[in-house]
Amino acid sequence: MAEPRERRHLAGGAALSVIAQAAPLVSGAVLSIVLARTLGPSGNGRYALLGTVLGITTLAFSLGLPAGLTYEVSRGNWALRPALRTAYRLAVLLGVVAASAGLAFYWVTRDSVFTGVSVAVAVIAMVSAPAFIQYQSASAIALGDDAYEIFSGLEIAHASVILCVGAVLAIPFGLTGAVIGLSASGIVTAVVGRVMLRRRSAPSSDDVTTSRDGLRRALHFGTQSWGANLLQQVNYRFDLLILGGYAASAAVGVYSVALTITGIAWILPQALQTVVFPRAAGLEADAAAGIVTSQDADDAVARVSRHTVMLLPPAAIVVTLLLGVAVPLLYGPKFHDSFALGMIMLPGVLALGLGKVLMSVVIGRGYPRYALYSGLVTVPITLGLYFALIPALGAWGAALGSSVSYGLTSVTILMAFRHVTHIPLRVALMPSRADLGDYGQAAGALRAWLRARRADAAGA
């Protein structure tokens, strides 16, 4: 058997990813509090709608490029620097199309979904689409190269700009200032990502033909998961858009706070999901090459899934406390309904937290089509729920439909995971005493990384 490739400790990567997942959520929450206090629920709702459309359009027109980059780089098929160069060039073209589509949607719905949002504000938001695709591509390449600190640094930079620019400018300039911060976060992070990754990588001799082959493979893989991600956005974000068409901006703002708070339950699962995808892809390649055994690869992903199950109860407790305590204290009485809305969504959110991690294993194993199958099954049901419940019940219907949709999605993902890995569900979902020791290893890996950074800084 060949010597295994040296890979960084997965627990340390997960620990850094927790920071990366938490930073944007915290900055977004602070900004939403500022908007809630200065503009009320309506301003909060308009910002949430603009951010949602920007996110959907950049995802729709990225063609799955970030997922393909992570997959190809993690398997050693594409060198870092040529992947970065090619991705950034393509992102400009894709981003222009995404921005145009976002503005077209705004123009069509400016008297319904986007009532009260000016053309100038919409342009400020959508013009950053090319930069956001570049930033997402840089993050994807960093993950594929096990550069967890770069990935975390990009997420922290993104969150810092939103907080320092968006929240500060929102106080004197309202929604316009907040949107400027959103747009600036994409632009700044795209630049930072390019600089950090170029410093990490040596010049490559890859020629134009090699880069084209790498791009072709990345898009071939990425477009398979892209279709699935696009469908899943219906489950994750169309509730907000449909609610915006049937209810006032204030209702959207109250509902968006419930979405933000319940999203905290995804921090730890998404941290695992982020690092598991490239690791699952790399282990699958190693197993195929005889570098590791298939059993070793199965043991690694089963351990991650068990840790996800262990993290769900504390996540539920934290979200419940935040909904019950932080919302009335920080947002004020106008957001009272956010507590009940969040509690309706919480069961589905927790189930999907596990589903996200399991699907990252399925995709990493080279089966992105199963994510597409999941979307094809759940999206028609989700849309039926949204259009049946939201016109009649408003935000309550959106919360109920979302929770059911999340739960159904998780069931289909669980079936796909079992089919692809053949790992017994008891092994994948029942934590063991030995799993507790991994948290000590994660803390040790993080401390070692911090000591190494301090030593590097002292030596410089």
Image (cartoon, rainbow, N blue to C red):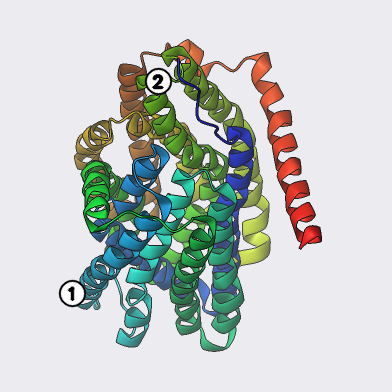
In the picture, measured across the screen, residue 102 lies left or right of residue 313, that is: left
x 35%, y 57%: residue: 82
User: Would residue 385 be seen by someone viewing this image from the given angle?
Assistant: no
Q: Secondary structure at mark 1?
A: helix
Residue 108 tag number: 1
Residue at 62%, 58% (x, y): give it. 327
**What residue sits right under mark 2 in the picture?**
287
At label 2, the amino acid type is: Ala
Q: As shown in the figure, which amino acid type bears the numbered disc 1? A: Val
Identity of the residue drawn at 33% across and 77% down? 127
The image position of residue 114, as x and y in percent, is 30, 74
Q: Is residue 68 above or below residue 25?
A: above
Between discs 2 and 1, the one toward the N terminus: 1
Image coordinates of residue 47 in percent, x first then y, are 43, 71
Residue drawn 46% across the image and 80% down it: 180
Vertical comparison of 408 with 142: above or below: above
